Every structure is written in structure tokens, then in C-alpha cells.
Amino acid sequence: MSIRPNQPRYIPARFKQRGSASLVVALVLLVVTSIITLYAGRNVVMEQRISANDYRAKQLAQAADAGVEYGIGWLISNPNGVTWNGVADAQGMESSTNNITTTLSSGYTIQVTMKRPLNNADRLQVYAKATETGGTVFSEGHTDVLMSKLLAGYPNAALVLSGCLSNVNGNPSANNADGVGVPVVISSQDASCIDTGHLNLNGDTVVGNAFTGTAWDRTFSISQAEAQAMAAAQVAAGVAFADRTVHWITDTSPWHTDIGSPTASPPVSRIIVFTGCPKVNGGTVLVGIVFFQGPCDSNGWGGGKVYGSVVMEGDMSKLNANTEFTYSKAYIDSLYNSNAGVQSKVPGSWIDKAS
């Protein structure tokens, strides 16, 4: 038997056409799949960018919010630490000049500024601007806070008593430098128990039944415990005696140390609390509000000078010699415009913005 050599296999034309069509379809599917894949990848990248930007925006907003809280915390520790430019903007607000800058552990830089209505220490706006270090994108938040004031109001008299006045000898003098014929001695008791004796009123008046409650509460917005804590904090911080704004004095021996100067411009007033009734004599000068946890039935003032107001819880007796009490708002202003701390945030005042 003979063997034929291999012959090329014959493939009909119709099968060749089918193969070409399949190849074209496969190429089309490949192109479509590639386009879909590229489009999907592009969407993934876009979503990642959007997510990253959203994350950064949230981080910036959180940093700004943290900055506001940082500013409030700073105010709590430094209730009178803000200096103001004294210039009203279009909204009637003055701005702080000693702005606070800090860097958070997250790497954001925070700048805290403050505003308030001109000459109004009760309400402050705390602003915090957060930026990425070296960046220009920022987020800002602000809220309003109410401040606790040191004083409930001006004493408006040289002597404020929750009791009576008696046994006044020598040549003591009381004067209201803010006017003539205005109150110079006021009491929560009836005027009949205010025996001025030899006290020179300099043409001013005595007013009884002027208030109810304690002399402390009429004068101060803070408690005695808070005042004592403020005094202790200044001592602990190493503030020099002459620079302290609150003095809590338990020594009952005669007091001969000057506190403050009436000739300073403007005068810097102090809260001076005597827990006892020491004699204040020998020409000793005290500027501000001098409070006695009385009654002081044998005070024995002799030549002491108070520029501001003496506030007595109880009766005052034996005011004598050449004691001088001179009241003026000028000697109280630095206290009246001072804050004791942050009282509360103002609900609904929080605002965020970004750029």
C-alpha cells in the first residue's frame, strides 16, 4: 500500500470569515472593557481625592473648633489678659491686640483673636482660624461667651455699711468726688442708725435702706471664696505684692502698708479684704474697694486714707482722727471693667466657615 504525502487541509471561506468576525468582536470587547476599566479607575481616583479633601476639611474644622476651646480655656486662666485696640469697626466691635498663636499636635496652626462691643466687658467673641502649616486653606470658628464681672456695680459712696455708724470722733472726712449733694454714706439699715457725729460729709448725703442683703453681694459679683482663690492664685504665681489686684488679709495687727496710688494715670484699683478689723492709721493709703468682715465696733481708724470705697459687713464704730474717705468712679473703674472668668457660652452663637 502506498502512502500519500501530507496535503494542506482545505478550509472553506465561510469558516475564515467567521474567525475574522470573532477576532473583531474580541477586540471590540477588549477595547470596551479597557474603557470601562479606565473610567472606573478614574472614578476611584476622583472619589479618593474627594474623600481626601473632605477629610482635610473636617480636620481643619475640628482644628478650628479646638482653637475656640483653647481660646476659652486661655480666658478662664487669664480673664483680664486681653488687651484691646479701643477702635470700633463697622459693627461697633473692638479687637484684641495680643492674639494667641499655637500649633496643635496634628500639625495645624491656630490663631485665636477676640472681639467685644466697645467698652463692654460682659460679652466676648472668640475666633479661631486653623490653617495647615505652610498652607493657605483655612477653617474658622467662633462663639460668644459671657464673662463674669468682678463687681455687681459701682459702690457710689465712700462708706457702704450693712449696719450702723456710731462714735465718730476727731476730724474724719468723707467725700464723693463725683458730685455735690450725692450719697457718701449708705446703709442697708434705716438712716436713723447712721450717727455721723464729727464726720465731715462735705455737703454730701447719708442714705438709709439703700439695699437689701449683704454689703458683699451688693458690691461684688463673685463669692468671698472666689475672691480668696483669686488672691491665692496671684500669690502662687509670684505676682509682686504691689501688683496684685486682689488681697486677702488675715492679719489683725495695725495695717501700715500702702496699696495702690491715687495719682496713677489711670488709677489701678484693688480688692482689699480684711477678714478681721485691723486699725488702719498712720496715713496709710489704700486704693480700690476695702472690705471688712465686720462688725468692727472698735475699728480705730486714725489718719488712714481710702480712695475708693470702704465696705463694711455690719456696724462700724470709733471712726476717728484725720481719716479720709474719697470716693470716685475713677478709683473703681479698673475693677468695674475687670472680669472674674468665663461664665458660659452663648447658646446658638457658634459659627463655622472655611475657604
Image: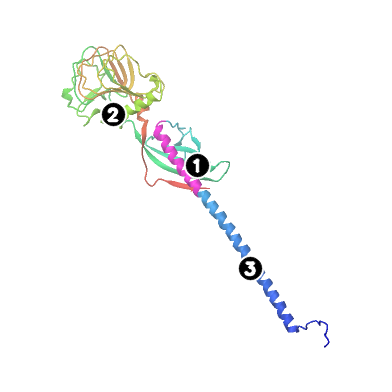
Q: How far is the residue under mark 2 from the one under mark 1?
A: 38 Å
Q: Are marks 2 and 3 in contact (CB under 8 Å)?
A: no
Question: Of the residues under marks 3 and 1, which one precedes in the sequence?
Answer: 3
| Nearest the eye: 233 or 351 | 233
Q: Which residue is mark 1?
A: 129
Q: CA distance from mark 3 to mark 1?
A: 48 Å
Q: Is residue 93 visible?
A: no
Q: The disc labelled 3 sits on which kind of residue? A: Thr
* Front residue (pair 64, 35): 35
Residue density around tag 3, few if under 14, some if 14–19, many if 20 or more, within 10 Å: few
Range of magenta residues: 58-80
Q: What amino acid does circle 1 point to?
A: Lys
Tell me, for residue 199, which label it has, or none: none
Picture coordinates of residue 291 (x, y %)? 28, 23
Under circle 1, the secondary element is strand
Residue 130 versus residue 166 in the image, above or below: below
Q: Which color scheme did the rendering employ for the protein?
A: rainbow
Q: Dividing the picture into quarters, in which one does residue 214 lie?
A: top left
- Residue tagged 2: 224
Q: Which residue, as the protein is rendered here, is positioned at the far bottom? A: 1
Q: Label 2 crowding class (10 Å Cα cut-off): few <14, some 14-19, many 20+?
A: some
Q: Position of residue 185 (x, y in %)?
A: 24, 23
Q: Residue at point 57% right, 54% down?
A: 49
Q: Is residue 119 magenta?
A: no
Main SS category, magenta section: helix
Mark 2 or mark 1: whose residue is earlier in sequence:
1
- Label annotation for residue 33: 3
> Residue 339: percent from the left, percent from the top?
37, 32
**Image location (x, y in percent) of residue 282:** 30, 11
